[in-house]
Amino acid sequence: MTYHKIERSRAKHPSNPRTKKLPEDHQVLRLLIDESERGADMFYATGFRAPDPFIYFQYQGKRTIVLSDLEIDRGRREAHVEEVLSWSDLQEKITSSSSLTYEQTLIALLKQVGASHLLLPASFSLGLARVLEEAGFFLLIQNGPFFPQRAVKKPQEIKALSRAIDITETGMKRAVEILTRSNIGKKNQLLWGGRKLTAELLRQEVEIAMYQAGGIPAGDSIIAAGEQACDPHERGHGPLYAHELIIIDLFPRDSKSGYYGDLTRTLVRGKATPAQQHLWQTCLEGQELALKKIKPSASGKIIERSVKDFFTRAGYPTEKKKGRWSGFFHGLGHGLGLELHEGPRFGDAILRPGHVFTMEPGLYIPGLGGVRHEDVLLVTAEGYRLLSHDSKVLEI
């Protein structure tokens, strides 16, 4: 385990904490206080969803959560832990008082457990950490992820991710269906169902489809066309037109498992120009180049660099022109799981079996448009396996 001591006043801690012998891992109490609807570490640790923060700790191999009376019965049924405690019972049995503050009750609980060393995530409340330190606990901060094992996905997580990707592909199919059925009106504006087809309308239809498939849409799926597509995180707005590049990037969360899907396709409703075709094909070849290099122990940084170099040779260097970036100027991919952008980043990773990454090279050329191809892959002992299966077509 890698961690460090919180630095405080030398008068309070006269000895150098870096020279003090640290305890064995089993002697350290791992403490987390967070909600688990969006708090990925808490949900990973407990398998229990709650909208309000609650207490989780692990000590000598035993996992415990402390819940309010509002959540206690559900927690006992659903949480994947060894012990579920009631906050009100703690106040009555441990402190013999319901008037103690939250901090006082927490301190009484931790002292009853018997741990002297607390391991906290880097995001832990500084104010509460200082209260715990004043109460005599030796505080340690986890360097990096609080649960590093989240980076390597278990079989049940792969299954959950596959379902989330299926939901994402349902949304993509709906987008393609609407664009295919749209008509080209005056000045090349797209019409659907007797009205103008806008990025907002297409986004609404796509997110309804993902919701009906069991997803929790982000609410800001990317439908960015033309010049808007040159900004990778532009959500897109306004009318959609024929013969222009449209980036569709969908990333819903599976309402059942909490895992995310992520998928991007770039389309043209109508006829693509030779320049658009070349940009789209070059981006696809960059993705294929990267996929050929995926294997255990490979360096994500080296693979990412090879794609950027390939794009440069193809005539799309990464550079600034008149204050705007042009070419490929974001990461090649990111981890995917209980968070949409989950560690490790592809460019920082040495690949291991069980890693799940997006693979999403992009090319953005102001005046021409943007292209991004994004799929999800699982690193395997033999190389990789794609978890996304939606086909890529430029013109519809």
Image: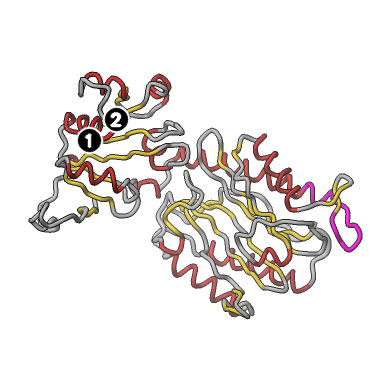
The magenta-colored residue range is 177-190
User: Label 1 belongs to which residue?
Assistant: 59
Residue sitting nearer the eye, 22 or 378:
22
Residue at figure coordinates x 61%, y 42% from the top left: 217
Which label sits on residue 64?
2
Tag 2 secondary structure = strand
Residue 180 part of the magenta segment:
yes
Circle 1 packing at 10 Å, graded few (<14), some (14-19), many (20+), is: some
Q: Is residue 370 left or right of residue 191?
A: left
Figure quadrant of residue 302: bottom left
Vertical side of 328 occupied by 248: above or below: above
Instruction: Check disc 2 and give the amino acid type.
Output: Thr
Q: Position of residue 330 (x, y in %)?
A: 53, 66
Q: Is residue 297 left or right of residue 100?
A: right
Residue sitting nearer the eye, 80 or 129:
129
Figure quadrant of residue 76: top left
Instruction: Give the Cα separation between the discs numbered 2 and 1.
Output: 8 Å
